Image: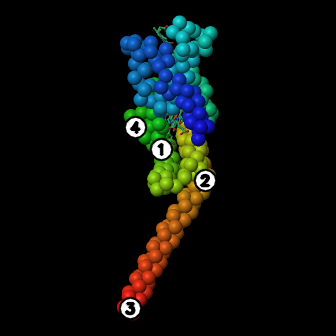
Amino acid sequence: MIRTLLTLLVLSVLCGPGLAEETVCLQCHGGQEGRLGAPVALWKTSVHAANGISCHDCHGGDPTDFGTAMDPDKGFIGAPEYEEVPAFCGRCHLGVREDYSSSAHGKALNRGGAQCVVCHGNHAVQEASIDLINEKSCSRCHSYERAAKVKKAIAQTEVNLQQLEDQLVELHRVGIDTQKISGQLFASRNDFRRLFHTVNVEKMEASTAGFATRLSKIESQIQTIKNELSQRKMIGGLVVLLLVIGGCIAMLIRKSYHEEE
Ligand code: HEC
Ligand code: HEC
Ligand code: HEC
Ligand code: HEC
Ligand code: HEC
């Protein structure tokens, strides 16, 4: 018990700076106007803020010292140029970067190929989804037609992922420990979503069968849990029925006993 409390305390101290702490970056830029201040409000809405990734995690520098915060000697790397963005974001998103680099977009990076920020934005990055593939975003540089083909290639797997996720939420709601299966689903989802970055329809279609197998294994684990649940419900029902019958018999015995008196 005391160990749990201590762990929580240590964790909250460790996570504090990442999650909630007012770093000097946030303090100073929060008071700036225009292009220097805007990132703060945008970042607050982002999936990065929600996961404790702050200004200095992307831009480097010393988040504890006003004087040397943006000193290159303290690791400050500033804002990346257009062509530098994939390496900048890819420090943390290694798998995505790998698929992206070998893609038509990655290879055309110096000739106007889309990079991370073009599709995800820079400071207000949101959780990724298939909705990022839409006419407005994907017809800025070429016809939407090729984007639509990519979307079609991943659509069914995305639907399957969503259904499994919904079922796990439902099981979790009735008190089932779904952590292990959720972990497997999360890993499959990440592996699948990095694949989009190849923007290669053949590659996506070729990988679809493999993902279908992975997902059907997860599906059958969920089915097993559901069967156990309904079995447990049936046994519960039987026990109640037996109790009721037992109660009736006891009442009858008592009644006939009283009548004999
Ligand atoms: C005392 C105020 C102050 C602090 C503290 C501060 N900044 Fe800045 N920052 C500025 C000003 C002013 C500029 C614009 C002038 C310049 O580039 O030097 C700027 C520029 C920037 C830029 C744009 C650079 C470019 O190449 O255009 C980035 C990125 C940045 N800051 C990130 C950070 C990060 C990350 C931290 C914390 C580690 C931080 N800042 C701390 C005031 C501050
Ligand atoms: C997920 C990584 C990431 C985080 C977190 C992040 N930035 Fe940035 N920032 C970028 C990228 C990438 C650019 C380059 C702009 C572009 O290409 O659109 C940039 C550009 C900037 C610029 C230059 C803007 C301009 O228009 O010249 C400033 C200033 C800046 N960031 C400040 C901050 C501050 C302050 C924070 C914290 C609130 C922050 N950034 C958090 C990725 C990030
Ligand atoms: C310092 C490490 C780091 C850097 C640099 C970074 N990210 Fe992230 N990013 C994370 C973490 C941690 C998460 C939350 C956990 C997760 O979902 O992977 C995340 C989440 C995301 C997500 C949501 C993933 C999902 O599950 O839907 C996207 C999209 C994303 N980042 C894009 C970017 C882009 C674009 C850049 C560059 C502008 C960038 N990231 C730079 C660490 C980083
Ligand atoms: C900033 C410009 C830009 C944006 C925005 C953009 N693309 Fe591209 N795209 C390119 C360039 C450049 C190429 C490679 C040269 C060419 O084939 O025209 C390309 C090629 C492609 C290809 C062909 C791949 C191949 O192997 O032949 C597909 C598919 C594609 N993009 C999908 C998308 C999707 C989906 C989106 C929206 C999420 C998108 N693009 C947004 C610039 C862009
Ligand atoms: C042409 C648009 C486009 C470009 C360029 C792009 N992304 Fe994505 N990204 C997407 C789409 C669309 C998805 C969601 C795919 C899906 O739902 O299967 C996604 C998903 C993601 C995810 C979530 C994957 C996961 O593990 O759940 C991350 C993280 C990410 N992108 C980061 C990046 C980074 C880093 C770069 C640059 C190296 C980048 N993206 C370049 C459109 C793009």
Which residue is label 2 attached to?
214
Q: Which mark sits nearer the N-terminus, 3 or 2?
A: 2
Q: Nearer the viewer, mark 4 or mark 2?
A: 2
Comparing 221 with 93, the one in front is: 221
| Image colouring | rainbow
> Which mark identifies residue 135?
4
Q: Which mark sits nearer the N-terminus, 4 or 2?
A: 4
Tag 3 near tag 2, CB within 8 Å? no
Q: Which quadrant would residue 10 be assigned to in this image?
A: top right
Which residue is label 3 attached to?
261
Which residue is label 1 attached to?
151
Q: Find numbered disc 3 in the image and state the secondary structure of the residue it sits on.
A: loop
Q: Nearer the viewer, mark 3 or mark 2?
A: 3
Q: Which mark sits nearer the N-terminus, 4 or 1?
A: 4
Whether residue 141 is visible here, answered yes or no, is: no
Comparing 208 with 30, the one in front is: 30
Q: Classify mark 3: residues with Cα within 10 Å, few (<14), some (14-19) or many (20+).
A: few
Q: Find numbered disc 4 in the image and state the secondary structure of the residue it sits on.
A: helix
The quarter in which the C terminus is drawn is bottom left
